Image (spheres, rainbow, N blue to C red):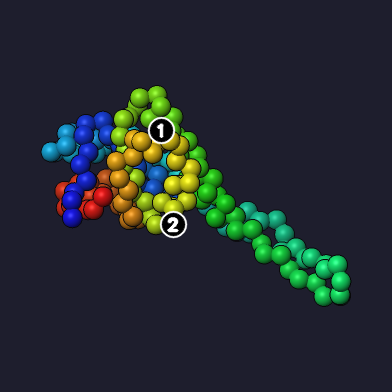
Amino acid sequence: MDKIRMDKGDWLVVCDGRKALILENLGDGMFPNLHTREVHEQPSPSTAAQGSDAPGRMNPAVGGSRSSVEQTDWHDEAERAFLRGLAGRLDAAVSSGETKALTMVASPRALGMIRADYSDVVRKALQGEVCKDLVKLPVYEIEKQLLLSGAAK
């Protein structure tokens, strides 16, 4: 396994569907030193607080039976909106020159969702992706697991 290589000024974005840490390498490729640059969090109210009513019903054109319509998963919609906003923030950062390169570390589900929202600018700046859920760990532990121990790109 190759360890992740990050130059000075590169970003490591660690996220899931509710929280994102944008970490900047203030060290160099040989001796990384990650510092928190931004923290983004999505509040997660209960489904009852997000939804409005019981699932709807449909009447068919023929026959008397009715069927229910699947209720919207508000948590899923909130995660998608959060990750869409994060992708927009990364696009703005790369476009404005805040960073030239970034690496994504996300849970498999979040990584699958955010990939669809990458702009061409972000795709070019992307150095690699790691499919791990590390967002709840402290920064020194993330650094240890990814940069020092040799996680795969």
Query: In this rendering, which labeled residue sits more in front, label 1 or label 2?
Result: 1
Q: Secondary structure at mark 2?
A: helix
Residue type, numbered disc 1:
Val
Question: Is 5 left or right of 76, judged from the image as shown?
Answer: left
Q: Position of residue 70 (x, y in %)?
A: 67, 64
Q: Is residue 51 above or below residue 115?
A: below
Q: Can you give x and y, in whole percent of width and height, for residue 8 in the image?
A: 21, 31
Q: Is residue 107 left or right of residue 65?
A: left
Q: Which badge, 1 or 2, comes first in the chain's sequence? A: 2
SS for dot 1 = helix
Residue drawn 34% across the image and 42% down it: 13
Are the residues tagged 1 and 2 within 8 Å (C-beta)?
no
Residue that badge 1 annotates: 121
- In the rendered image, which residue does mark 2 sit on? 109
| Residue type pointed to by label 2 | Arg
The spot of residue 9 in percent (x, y) is: 26, 30
The residue lying toward the viewer, choosing from 31 and 58, is 58
For residue 90, say whether it is visible: no
Q: Residues within 10 Å of mark 2 (few under 14, many from 20)?
A: few
